[in-house]
Amino acid sequence: MPELAFSRRSALRGLGAVVLPAALTACGVPAAFVPEDRREGPDRSARDRSLAFSNWPLYIDTDEEDEARRPTLDEFSRKTGIEVRYTEEINDNDEFFGKISPALMNHQETGHDLVVVSDWMAARFVHLGWAQKMDRSAQSNVAEYLDPQLRSPAFDEGRLHTVPWQSGITGIAYNRKALGRELKSVKDLWQPDLAGKVTLFSGLDESFALLMQGDGVDVTRWTEADFHRMCDQVERMVRKRHIRRFTGNDYTSDLSKGDVLACQAYSGDVIQLQADNPDIEFVVPEEGAELWAESLLVPNLARHKANAEALVDHYYDPAVAARLAASVNYVCPVPAAREVLAGSDDKETAELAENPLIFPDDEMRRRLVVARDISSVERRSFAKRWNAIVGL
């Protein structure tokens, strides 16, 4: 299982990269948007059987005896003859955006054929016209097996430019034995017996949807008023010292040590925490929880677009998706992989098929929604208010 020392969902971010395109436009630099018909470059896939794939650390299967080997990538290369130059260089969404945005803004190659970023960042690429439309006619597995709940997010209707790599749920984790009762609702976080024993995520994109859902908001179409009402509530809890602190991925340490009893949490992390402490539980609240994804996209002018599309489709083969899910323990975006795991001769692997945090059941899915993203116009003022509350 991936180590908990790092989480791709909870890397802290500043505002610099967020406002870059708007700031340049205001200074007289031409708008950064690239029309669809100017995104593709000469594709060298046929004569150069390779591609450059950039991902987050600890986000792919590795060989137990040799961690430098990645079995599902090796299988792809054997089948297709395509060499994959795989790098774990994405440690922060905004940092990576800042690294490649000058090239994309100036209509230059980035050197990347395929990258994985969080969906709120993928939304930025799509809105700027910096992600190429994929050829779904060459991706039969994606067309058949992609999770219906992830098929058409607001930022990329029809998933034309992005495809989920892995998915997950932002919910509540708590130590049931230490607390002595169940948690069922976001509102339960504010009960007096949890004063000073609650943490929330410091990142705006990671926090806001679940907190709004606790107020009964439909986060597929939330408004500015909904956002500020949520902030008002969090500010009150900060003044009362009810919230112990705002965290990145270090919430896992707080929960494990007992410094906190309940917190915002990611489903994939909790699966790993439960291996050491079965008293830790994960809750999809009664009001609902956010279903999110980190997605694959092909940046503009990628040299090996067809090769990249073939690799994406490889990971939507249920057998391949099952091996990846068994390794990283996030929500699998290929529900058909569940049957593959269930048929495993290995007992622990087969049990993963019954884990609702990897394959949500129908009852859980009814409470999961994909939140609409924060627009570029909203982001500057919203982040300013949120960061003031959090102390960033």
Image (cartoon, helix red, strand yellow):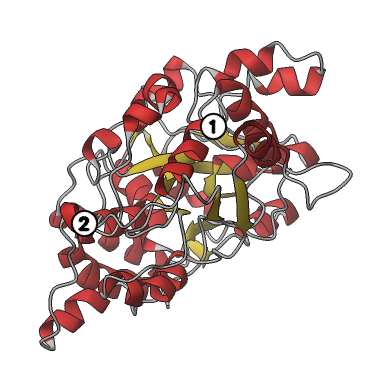
Q: Quadrant of residue 383?
A: bottom left
Q: Is residue 174 left or right of residue 157?
A: right
Q: Which numbered marker is on residue 377?
A: none
Q: Which quarter of the image is occupied by the C terminus?
A: bottom left
Q: Position of residue 196 (x, y in %)?
A: 55, 61
What residue do we see at 26% from left, 76% from top?
106
Relative vertical location of residue 336 with respect to residue 24 in this rendering, above or below: above
> Does label 2 or label 1 sit earlier along the sequence?
2
What residue is shown at x 15% (from left), y 57% (from top)?
A: 35
Q: Residues within 10 Å of mark 2 (few under 14, many from 20)?
A: some
Q: In the rendered image, which quarter contains the N terminus?
A: top right
Marks 2 and 1 close (CB-CB < 8 Å): no
The residue furthest right is 65
Q: Residue furthest bottom?
A: 27
Mark identifier at residue 314 = 1
**Residue 245, image x, y percentages:** 52, 67
Secondary structure at badge 1 equals helix
Residue 127: x, y in percent?
A: 21, 56
Query: Which residue appears farthest toward the front when viewing the image?
Result: 47
Q: Quadrant of residue 29?
A: bottom left
- The Cα–Cα distance between marks 2 and 1, rounded to whole angstroms, is 27 Å
Q: Is residue 199 left or right of residue 119?
A: right
Q: Which residue is mark 2?
A: 127
Camera-side residue: 98 or 179? Answer: 98
**In percent of the image, x 58 and y 38: which residue is there?**
330
Residue 361 seen from this side: yes
Tell me where residue 63 appears, x and y as whole percent. Answer: 80, 42
Q: Can you say whether 326 is above or below 91 in the image?
A: above
Q: Is residue 19 visible?
A: no
Query: Residue flagged by tag 1: what amino acid is it?
Result: His
Q: Amino acid at mark 2?
A: His
